[in-house]
Amino acid sequence: MDKWEEDARNRLRAQMSRQNISFKALQARLDALGIHDTPVNLSNKIGRGKFSYSFYLQCLEAMKCEPSSSAAPVEVSSED
């Protein structure tokens, strides 16, 4: 696992821990958003740290969290 995967894993796990959210509870919250997975698959995916940024954002949304302001999208103008 590289440092980026480890950081992503640790950030999600930390947020789950702060809110006392289990993998089963996360699965139920994701399911309510139309994202279907099992608690075991979520545990494995997060444990490996190999997931897309969209999955990370989905988890934050399910936990009612905002991504850090440094990760917020910015408008970029395309000037030639």
Image (cartoon, rainbow, N blue to C red):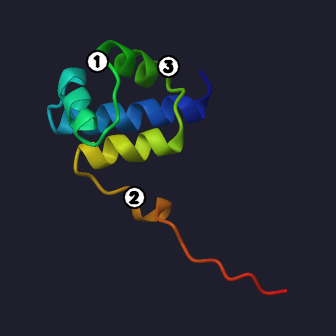
Tell me the residue that label 1 is attached to. Answer: 39
Question: Is the residue 69 above or below the residue 6 in the image?
Answer: below
Tell me the residue that label 3 is attached to. Answer: 48
Quadrant housing the C terminus: bottom right
Mark 2: few, some, or many residues within 10 Å (few <14, many ≥20)? few
Q: Residue 33: x and y, percent?
A: 28, 43
Residue at (46% x, 64% y) in the render:
72
Residue at (16% x, 38% y) in the render:
19
Residue at (45% x, 21% y) in the render:
45
Q: Residue 76: x and y, percent?
A: 64, 77
Image side of residue 11 versus residue 53, left or right: left
Kindly report the distance in space between the C-alpha atoms of the residues bearing marks 2 and 3.
22 Å
Tell me the residue that label 2 is attached to. Answer: 68
3 vs 1, front mark:
1
Q: Residue 44: x and y, percent?
A: 42, 15
Kindly report the distance in space between the C-alpha atoms of the residues bearing marks 3 and 1.
14 Å
Kindly report the distance in space between the C-alpha atoms of the residues bearing marks 2 and 1.
25 Å
Q: Could you tell which of marks 2 and 3 lies nearer the N-terminus? A: 3
Q: Residue 36: x and y, percent?
A: 34, 28
2 vs 1, front mark:
1
Q: Work out whether residue 8 or residue 23 is closer to the camera in this orientation and state it.
A: 23
Report which quarter residue 17 is drawn in: top left
Q: Secondary structure at mark 2?
A: loop
Farthest residue to the right: give it. 80
Q: Work out whether residue 27 or residue 1 is closer to the camera in this orientation and state it.
A: 27
Residue at (49% x, 35% y) in the render:
7
Q: Work out whether residue 28 or residue 22 is closer to the camera in this orientation and state it.
A: 28
Mark 1: few, some, or many residues within 10 Å (few <14, many ≥20)? some
Q: Which amino acid does the dot numbered 2 rest on?
A: Ser
Contact (Cβ within 8 Å) of mark 2 with mark 3: no
Image side of residue 35 versus residue 77, left or right: left
